[in-house]
Amino acid sequence: MSGGARLENANPLIFQRTGERLQTANDEDEDVADPIDDREIFDILSVSINDPEHPLSLEELNVVEQVRVRVNDQENTVGVEFTPTIPHCSMATLIGLSIKVKLLRSLPERFKIDVHITPGTHASEDAVNKQLADKERVAAALENSQLLEVVNQCLISNARTG
Amino acid sequence: MAADSALLLGLVEEFVLGQQDRKAVDTATGKLKAGQFTILQLVEALGLHLTSSQPQTRGRGVQLLSNVLQECYGDLTEREVEVLIVFYENRLKDHYVITPHVIQGLKALTKCSVLPPGSAVSILKSLFQDIHVQSLMLAERSCVYNILIQLMESRESELKGLGADFVFGFVQSVDGERDPRNLLLAFHIARKIVHEGYDLGKFTEELFEVTSCYFPIDFSPPANDPHGITQEELVLALRVVLTGTPRFAEFLLPLIIEKLDSDVQSAKLDSLQTLTACASVYEQKDLAQFLPGLWASLRREVFQTASERVESAGLAAVGTLTACLSRSVLNSDSEDSLNVFLELVLKDCQHHLCEPDLKLVWPSAKLLQATSTASYRASHRVAAAVLPSLIEQYNSRTQCAQRRTLLEVLQGFVHPVTSSEEGKYESVLLDFRQSLCSIVFSALSESNADLQITSMRVLTALGQQTDLLSSPQSDVELAVDHLTRLILEEGDPKVSLAVVECAGSLARLHPAAFISKMVPRLKEEIFSGGLRSKAVRQRCVAALAAVSSRPSLVQESTPVLLQVLTSAHTGTGAFSLEEVISVCHSLQKIAEQAQDTEETGGVFHDVIPRLLGLALQAALQGSSGHCSPILEETVLSAMVPIISTTCARLQLAGQTASRAVSLFLDGDVSFLPENAFPAQIQLLKAGDSRSQSQMVCLLMGCVCWLPRTVEVPQMDRLLLELLELSCTCDHPLSYTSAAKCYAGLVNKSPAGEALDSLIDRTLKRISTELDSASSPVRTQAFTLLLWVSKALLLRYHPLSTALTDKLFSLLSDPELGWLAADGFSLLMSDSPDVLNRGSHADVRMMYRQRFFTENSAKLVEGFNAAVQEKKSGYLKALSHIVNNLPRQVQLTELPALLPLLLEALLCPDQGVQVSTLSCLQPVLLDPPSALITQLEVLVGRTLALTTSPTMKVRIASLRCIHALSRFPEHEIMPFRARVLRALAAPLDDHKRVVRSEAAVARNEW
């Protein structure tokens, strides 16, 4: 990160973190079933994925927002839209892939996971969306040990605190 | 004499031929020390060999001489030393085989206290001249350095006479050194050269080059390194050399700038720390020309950093640089480099402050704050440049988030000024006082919670500055009004927490304003009746407790709280049970934070009788029907800590205690207020109503917390009554409190026969009750047993084993087995209300470990002997004991206990499962090798528990699995697929808390 390497976006906008989810009495109660909701997915994403460029979480960079997460617990679908910080961000695919991997690892198998870019926020939106939606390509990307390492780095660096 | 010389010749012969080694040296040394011959005679005896034509033979000869010298350098005369030195200096020119022995001998000679003047110089000269140090072996090089160190210590002035030649010689001999052990020595010499004023002459740059080529040090010691040299040691040793003198500045600063560009984190960190160290030695003229370069690197590090350590090191460097620049005296002709530097900083940072949404606001603010903390002049300059624009921006921005950021930045600027040379100058912020205050007050009246919280932090910071808030009293009063309003109106728990904190810290500085403004208002609110909600009153009570840090405030606030209790008792105010309890907590908090002064002491010795009086009134009424909240067990237990905190500290505690004792023993009510009690009260009699007997817990709070110097009056009678009560009463709170009180007193009573016989009697009493299976008071007896054993265990009393053995035997008791198992948790943990350090109890160090090592074998034995149904009791006891042990002990004891703990995982009792898992989890974070062999079983059993019906068990087992993921990779690899499959199930758990733990664990795997 140091030395001459220029960052694509050196001074990004920073957004405030939302606080911890409040623990309610229901959470402690054995008999109440908590459905999986938007906030839970959002927590999974915001806490533990780092932007590859900055030591900041996706939430702080406003890449992921709670309003752009859609969950349907009954129909077993999860949809996430993410917003790259700048329209030409070359990391968009990597970020998308990280989100996808994170969700794959953190959610029950019954869910169908759909990750795509917020419409109108990236130059090559369609291409990235297509890549992320293609099961074969995602699987192939995860076979690639180098790529997997980069993704794991995005995911792991924060896991210490989380 | 002739025999001696013959013997000597024989010895020499044997040694040189290689037949004898150590023995010859030892004999020669012994004889020499005994005065049977002199060193010169030894040289004569060696004569032939020293002049032999074979270098090996000469080498052996010199070796013998050197070895002998090493043993007896202290016995030589000056004349002998002189001769020997001349001899050795000549030998240096000899064959290379001999050189190591020569150096050894010289090293021994330099240790002589009778070294003739001038010889140090000549030794060094011939050393530097005749040997090339770096072509020697490791040990000889170290020998040379040791000679240098030795001479520098003993003959400093002579070496300084050598002038720059000495430095040159040193540079030559060190150049190219690679071994870390020798480097440490070399750095030590260099440090001495630099710090003790040796003449560097024209070799400054050479000396710098020869040391700085190691900077930044990258050294990873080999595994199981026997020398124990760490990178840290080397780094520090080198840093001291490099930063030792300003004469290195022109070389060092460019080097630092260069190394800051490095990609290696540790190199960056080292460079920054070195910069910080040298900036505290250098003066501005050394730094001046490098400022732009340094600033550029530092700015980059702070703006684009990836690690917090680099950032904070960078900020520290900026701070010391500024401090250094402001320290130096200005010449009239040179420009002020502080100004130049600050210009640079401001130019790069100031404009970022105008963009409160962007990332660089924070690094810029931190940089500016670092400079302004460094010195008064710098803070003046920075404040003048930055504050107006910040204030203006705050007033022009409307978004809460932006305003909050700005306010937080402002807070950062208010803080550092506090630490800078307080009192010498008027505060830098004085000019901005008005506008700062108005910003804070306007933010306080905003509706955004975060903004309010931040503004209260700024307010606290402002309050810390002596002349900022207090100069016109009106500002303080305005602040207090704002705080009061917030207490009354804001429901957000985070805000009220911040208010209470802020009020607490301001009240310490400005008690008068709080007395006149806040306390009356809060009092009014508390007693205003049902108009306001309960929550408001709760907040008022909490705030009252928080502000009561000064005696004057305590005097105002405690009567209010006591009045609440009274009116709750009489039923006039509509106070709920929780409110009464929170009032008690507040009183306790006041007692804790009150400084131990006469004034507060007086207040609290008023409080205790009133509390006792209230409780007694309630108890007496309780028997006649009317029910006061003070009768509730929870309220009474909340009252105990008030009394105990007070009694543990105040000087008047003894008096209070004796009054309390006479109240409980004799029914002496004369010291209680509102003296309207019947004369015949017997509080310690079990037969009376439970409402009276339970008051014994108040007595416990009083007598068990007394400092050990204070004697409890009527001790014997008191103990007797307590024993009776604890064994006969059937009300849980009463008999438990009595047992605790008894135990607390036993713990503090002086050792001796009286105590021993007392314990004997107690044990007999307990045993009779416990042994008769039909006794109605077995539980009571057990409780007493438990507490008394704890009391004795804590003080290492020899009789404690008798009691704990009794407890162990109870583990197989059909009725009390479970209770006994749980009792071990009580035995091993700290109890909050009695028998802890705060109550001045006699608590020895490491009693837990001691108990564990003495008894773990018994436990395992008992477990093996017990029938199947009883085993779980033992497991439970074990897991309680192990859980409370310090981690270090857990780790060492684990291998022995592992089978038992794994067994416990199979135990159907969920309490045992949870406590075993929570005991395993920290151990798993740093796994001992014993665990790895059991991995298969461990993984299997914990995975099985992830589907347990109890939420707690599921969470604990998932945490364990998470911890397992940090085991060495090759060990856990075989389990990966299995664990991932098994973790899919808890991912779909119906409880969210479980799901999140599962997600964390699964991601790690």
Image: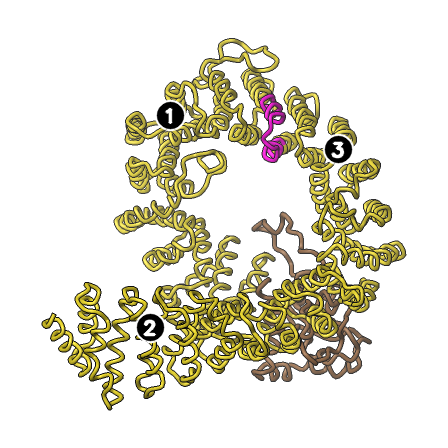
Chain colours: A brown, B yellow
Q: Residue at x 25, y 87 (%)?
A: B56
The disc, 1 or 3, on the residue closer to the chain's N-terminal end is 3
Residue B756 in the image: state x and y as whole percent.
Answer: 29, 29
Disc number for residue B773: none
Q: Chain of mark 2?
A: B
In terms of image quadrants, where is residue B784? top left
Q: Nearer the viewer, mark 2 or mark 3?
A: 2
| Marks 2 and 1 in Cβ contact (< 8 Å) | no
Q: CA distance from mark 2 to mark 3?
A: 84 Å
Q: Is residue B800 magenta?
A: no
- Residue under pointer 1: B727
In terms of image quadrants, where is residue B732? top left
Q: Chain of mark 3?
A: B
Residue B34 in the image: state x and y as whole percent.
Answer: 19, 63
- Residue under pointer 2: B82
Q: Is residue B514 above or below residue B854?
A: above
Q: Residue at x 58, y 61 (%)?
A: B995
Q: CA distance from mark 1 to mark 3?
A: 51 Å
Label 3 secondary element: helix
Residue nearer the viewer, B131 or B803: B131
Task: Name the amino acid, label 1.
Answer: Cys
Q: Chain of mark 1?
A: B
Highlighted magenta segment, given as a residue range: B587-607
* Label 3: how many Cα within 10 Å (few below 14, some 14–19, many 20+): many
Q: Nearer the viewer, mark 2 or mark 1?
A: 2
Horizontal arrangement in the rendering, residue B232 relative to residue B842 (left or right): right
**Residues behind callouts 2 and 3 on a single chain:** yes
* Label 2: how many Cα within 10 Å (few below 14, some 14–19, many 20+): some
Disc number for residue B514: 3
Task: Name the amino acid, label 2.
Answer: Glu
Residue B662 in the image: state x and y as whole percent.
Answer: 47, 16
